[in-house]
Image (cartoon, rainbow, N blue to C red):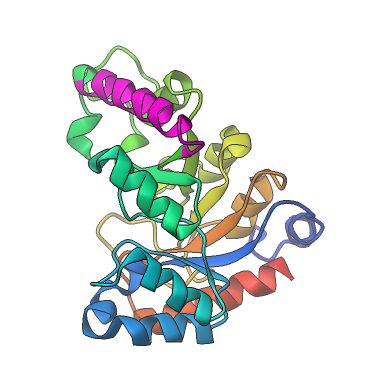
Amino acid sequence: MTDPNTDDDINSQILDRDGALRGLSVQLYSLREESKDNFDTVLESVAEQGFDAIEPYRLFGKSPREFVRQVEGLGMQISSSHFPWANRTDIRSLTDTLAEFGLRRAIGGYMPDEVNTEDALKATIDTTNSLVDQLAADGMTLALHNHWWEFSPVPGSSDERLIYHRLQADCPDVEFELDTYWAANFGTVDSVAEMQRIAKRAPLLHIKDGPLVKDEPMVAVGRGKQPIANIIAAADADVLEWLIVELDACATDVTTAVGESRTFLDNLLG
């Protein structure tokens, strides 16, 4: 079988794209332990590795304004932010912080107990649509980030659709930050098909790689079992803005793996 990450036809589809893609970002959750010791050094190392942007999940004592100045001073942008988490934050605090970051898109997501019963999923759908409306009043949008548990049906439900598909159908104005690794649900779901399904609603992609085995650590992008090139080729070039590297748990030195991931994606994109 041809390796999808080296297939010439797939790679040419990526290289020929002339769309909305702004560059490569990294979710700083990947470097959370290193950030506890010296957040400044982490930001400097990410810039030195050549990333165009970062996606924070915490600011480690910095104010939003201080953080923006530092990131911009290192020649990077803030692509998006998991801080504050949209559905855990007062709406005014959320929109004020995002405005400081220069962003018009909030990101949120749900834990298993918020989607794993019919009543919980209905409440979550209502919460999501309400948040979309509140953000729209400030000219902002909401993107949902996923984990693996949304890529199965509600346990015991007569509705056999994946939870993620039900969120897509019942929250029509939501955008998506597709976590392409979790979307595979450890090899039980076709992550390329999931990308195609929401391509026109997915401006952000979390790109990660690994063995597709639950509880086993991830590896540098391009060294695992994910069809990275196929996934990117399936995105809508007119919608996709950022490819965001994230390694939740890594089998090797995570700082090195983050840099190797950037190099792999840079070469893939040409």
Horizontal and vertical percent position of residue 6: 68, 66
Answer whether residue 122 is magenta in the image: yes
Q: Is residue 216 left or right of residue 24?
A: left
Residue range of the region highlighted in magenta in the rendering:
120-141
Q: Quadrant of residue 219?
A: bottom left
Instruction: Find residue 251 and report its horizontal and vertical position in percent.
Output: 32, 75
Q: Residue furthest left?
A: 113
Kindly identify the residue that appears in the image at 40 percent across and 45 percent down.
107
Q: Image height check: is 200 above or below 207?
A: above
Q: Nearer the viewer, residue 130 or 187?
A: 130
Q: The N terminus lies in which quarter of the figure?
A: bottom right
Q: Which residue: 59% across, 74% down?
A: 264
Screen quadrant of the C terminus: bottom right
Q: Nearer the viewer, residue 87 or 102?
A: 102
Please tell me which residue is depicted at 31% across the width and 38% down the height of the picture: 91
Tell me which residue sits at (59%, 78%) in the image.
263
Residue 142 in view of the camera: yes
Would you say the magenta stretch is mainly helix, strand or loop?
A: helix
**In the image, is 129 to the left or to the right of 180?**
left
Relative to 152, does residue 147 appear above or below in the rendering? Answer: below
Q: Is residue 62 left or right of residue 21?
A: left
Is residue 211 or residue 130 the one in the foreground? Answer: 130
Image location (x, y in percent) of residue 123: 24, 21
